[in-house]
Structures are given as structure tokens and as C-alpha cells.
Image (tube, grey):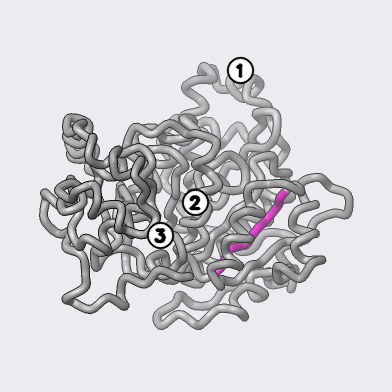
């Protein structure tokens, strides 16, 4: 059943606007046994988070889903210092707390069956982000998968769509970087707290996303990237969007969980076919074979299933002027971005043939640690690509 906070009358709507109520809501996040579903039930029943902590054991156990052990855990909670630390860290990191009952909470996510009562956010969301597509796939992607991700993501951005993904290695990172290179909007949803960006190697990428989009998490700021968090966060990735595009997935990949959740949320699902027998394409090929996803050869296959945007950019499909699909060559050249002296030095050494980082550093006369920083910026600018084995080439 879909949760719909908009369906509550003004008289029935919970009060979570004040600082005290928001602090009590965060405190509920820290109580063992409570979780998101019970938090929503408690607040909808008692109307205010502070009322939850003031309620007697008998009142709490009258709330559907709240047993005596959970009621006792709520009444025993005393770790107000932990709540203070959350808000102190949030202020220091310029993190904003969105609650399920805020007007600024993403409406598409609110109308799913399991929306998180809290979202911590760095950056900002805009009205245009209602028109979003999730682009997901395997961490162990192929060069084919990277190329298709860049082509389709660029076309979606050029058509005015925000790109949602999970900041993971592989397809997720390529989708975020491509959106940034195209001067588009992108949003990352973490499976850890915002103070524990995972993978740590994508901290710079997260910072770049914050400049022109947002990074979100339902978890407390210092939450570690526990394995169980990632399937949970996938419902947010799909729930924020009009549809989910799966580029590559192994037979039991996490991207397939996102696709399943998208179906359950009544969202579109798209998948790119891959070579028969290729491990990274087994999941996507199965999605298509079983009728769980629409086969995608170019961006028009996606756009045809979506409502037109009110003020979209001039339509630009993934097809090239020669009529090639997403599985063909990449499209139009972009103007060369401004480069720093070091970025220009590295770029001028690279060619369209992959070059190992050690060879590049030897020719440039810079250490690998320094070169990798500049190469990451060149990736953000969309003119350099990293392939397997720490090799780089011009795009």
C-alpha cells in the first residue's frame, strides 16, 4: 500500500515543524526496534514526535505494530547527547533535514509504500528534479557498459532529466560524472551516512554533485555502509524517479533489486541488452526476456514512455547524425572546457588509445597521487575516460 501524506487533512496532519519535534523525530531514528515503518505509525497515531516519548507504555502498545518491547525501548531512551551530535554535525556540514511531512520532501518518494520519515541532504533539490530517471548497473561494468551509460545519460540530460544513482563504482559513477560533464543535474543516494561517503574514493565526486544537485541519505550522519543498507536505499533511488534504466547487471546484481522496486512502485523500467553469455549482461537480458523491462537501443526508446517535460531542452536523442543507436559511436562533440595547467599537460599526453597511469606519470613527470586528482577533474569535465587496469584515454 502506498503511503500518502498529502491525503491527511490539516486536522490529522502530524506536527513536525518545530525544532523540538524534529529533534524528537531524529531521536526515534536512534531507538532500537523502531525503524521507519513504526516511526510513521507512531507519529501518525500520536500526531507529534514529542508525544511519542511522553506517551505511557499502554498508549504506545495501542499503536499498531508496537509491542511491549518496542514501547519499553522508546520509554527507556535517554541518549539526547547523540541527538545533539547529529544536529551539530549537520550544521557544520551544511546538511539539511527533510521530513516526510515537509512541503519540500520529494513528492514522488512520498507516494511510495515505504518512504523514509527523514532524509538528510547536502546540496539542494529543485522542482525540475521531479523529472528524474535512475541510471543504475553493476560495479563490475565493461567498457561497453560505460560507453552506453555515457551516451544514454548525456541524451537524458540534454532532454532535461535529472539523473539519480547510488554513487557506487561502475555504472553509477559513470552516470553521475556524465551528468556533471553535460552541465546537468544529478542526485546521489547513499547507503551510509553523509559523513561516511561510500565508497570513500568517491568523496570528491560527491562534493562535485553537491555543487549542482544533491546527495541524500536516510541514515544518521555517521552510519557505516552496512551491507543491508544498500538494498534499502534502492527504494529511494527508484522512488524519486519516473523510471529506472538498468545498463548492465549480473544475474544477482543490486541493480535488479532497484528494477524490482521500481515495478512495485509503478514506475517504468528500461534495460540495455548485452552480448549473450556476457556475465555483466545476464541480468539485463533476463529482465528483457521476462518482460520486466523495455528493451533500450537509444534514448528515444526511453523518452517515448515518459510524459513530455513542460520546458525541456531541445530534444537530442542518443542517435548520431549518421543514425547510429546507443550501441554505435558517441554523438556530438562538446566545446573544450577550461583546463588548469596540470590538466592540460596530462590531457595533451593522452590519446584515444588507453595509456596506463604509470606510463602517463612517467611522461608527465608527476607522481600518480597528483595525476589521479587531475585525471578525476578531467573525467568530471567529460574529456577523459578511465578504463580497466588504471588506464586512461581521451574521450
Which secondary structure lies at badge 3?
loop
The disc, 3 or 2, on the residue closer to the chain's N-terminal end is: 3
* Image coordinates for residue 81, horizontal then vertical, percent: 17, 30
Q: How far apart are marks 1 and 2 (CA)?
A: 25 Å
- Farthest residue, direction front: 58
The disc, 1 or 2, on the residue closer to the chain's N-terminal end is: 2
Tell me, yes or no, whether the highlighted magenta stretch contains residue 285. no
Tell me, yes or no, whether the highlighted magenta stretch contains residue 246. yes
Q: How far apart are marks 1 and 3 (CA)?
A: 51 Å
* Residue under label 2: 336
Corner quadrant of residue 194: top left
Counting the numbered discs, the total is 3
* Residue under label 3: 115
Determine the residue positioned at 14% across, 59% down.
17
Q: Which of 393 and 148 is in front in this view?
A: 148
Mark linked to residue 6: none
Q: Which of 110 and 277 is in front in this view?
A: 110
Residue numbers of the magenta segment: 243-249
Which secondary structure lies at badge 1?
helix
Determine the residue positioned at 19% across, 39% down.
87
Whether residue 58 is visible to the viewer of this picture, yes or no, is yes
Judge whether 88 appears above or below 151 on screen.
Answer: above
Report crowding for label 2: few under 14, some 14 to 19, many 20 or more residues within 10 A (C-alpha).
few
For this view, does 250 lie left or right of residue 85? right
* Image coordinates for residue 4, horizontal then vertical, percent: 37, 72
* Image coordinates for residue 71, horizontal then vertical, percent: 29, 45
* Residue under label 1: 362
Whether residue 213 is visible to the viewer of this picture, yes or no, is no
Amino acid at each position: 500500500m502506498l503511503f500518502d501524506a498529502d491525503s491527511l487533512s490539516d486536522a490529522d496532519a502530524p506536527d513536525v515543524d518545530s525544532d523540538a519535534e524534529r529533534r524528537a523525530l531524529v531521536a526515534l531514528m536512534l531507538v532500537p526496534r523502531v525503524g521507519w515503518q513504526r516511526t510513521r505509525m507512531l507519529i501518525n497515531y500520536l500526531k507529534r514526535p514529542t508525544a511519542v516519548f511522553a506517551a505511557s507504555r499502554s498508549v504506545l502498545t495501542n499503536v499498531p505494530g508496537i509491542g511491549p518491547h518496542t514501547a519499553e525501548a522508546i520509554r527507556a531512551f535517554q541518549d539526547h547527547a547523540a541527538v545533539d551530535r547529529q544536529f551539530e554535525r549537520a550544521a557544520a556540514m551544511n546538511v539539511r533535514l527533510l521530513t516526510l511531512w515537509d512541503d519540500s520532501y520529494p513528492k514522488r518518494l512520498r507516494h511510495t509504500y515505504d518512504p523514509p520519515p527523514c532524509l538528510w541532504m547536502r546540496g539542494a533539490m529543485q522542482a525540475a528534479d521531479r523529472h528524474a530517471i535512475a541510471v543504475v548497473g553493476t560495479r563490475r561494468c565493461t567498457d561497453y557498459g560505460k560507453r552506453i551509460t555515457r551516451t544514454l545519460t548525456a541524451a537524458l540530460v540534454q532532454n532535461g532529466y535529472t539523473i539519480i544513482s547510488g554513487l557506487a563504482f561502475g555504472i553509477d559513477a559513470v552516470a553521475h560524472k556524465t551528468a556533471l560533464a553535460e552541465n546537468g543535474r544529478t542526485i546521489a543516494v547513499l547507503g551510509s551516512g553523509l559523513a561516511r561517503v561510500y565508497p570513500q574514493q568517491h568523496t570528491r565526486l560527491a562534493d562535485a554533485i553537491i555543487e549542482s544537485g544533491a546527495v541524500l541519505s536516510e541514515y544518521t550522519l555517521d552510519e557505516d555502509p552496512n551491507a543491508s543498507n544498500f538494498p534499502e536505499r534502492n527504494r529511494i533511488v527508484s522512488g524519486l524517479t519516473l523510471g529506472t534504466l538498468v545498463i548492465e547487471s549480473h544475474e544477482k546484481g543490486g541493480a535488479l533489486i532497484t528494477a524490482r522496486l521500481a515495478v512495485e512502485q509503478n514506475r517504468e523500467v528500461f534495460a540495455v541488452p548485452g552480448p549473450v553469455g556476457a556475465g555483466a549482461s545476464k541480468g539485463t537480458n533476463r529482465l528483457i526476456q521476462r518482460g520486466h523491462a523495455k528493451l533500450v537501443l537509444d534514448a528515444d526508446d526511453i523518452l517515448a514512455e515518459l510524459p513530455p517535460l513542460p520546458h525541456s531542452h531541445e530534444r537530442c536523442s542518443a542517435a548520431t547524425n549518421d543514425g547510429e543507436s546507443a550501441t554505435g559511436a558517441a554523438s556530438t562533440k562538446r566545446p573544450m572546457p577550461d583546463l588548469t595547467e596540470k590538466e592540460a599537460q596530462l590531457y595533451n599526453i593522452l590519446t584515444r588509445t588507453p595509456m596506463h597511469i604509470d606510463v602517463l606519470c612517467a611522461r608527465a613527470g608527476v607522481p600518480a597521487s597528483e595525476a589521479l586528482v587531475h585525471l578525476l577533474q578531467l573525467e568530471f569535465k567529460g574529456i577523459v575516460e578511465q578504463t580497466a587496469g588504471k588506464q586512461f584515454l581521451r574521450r
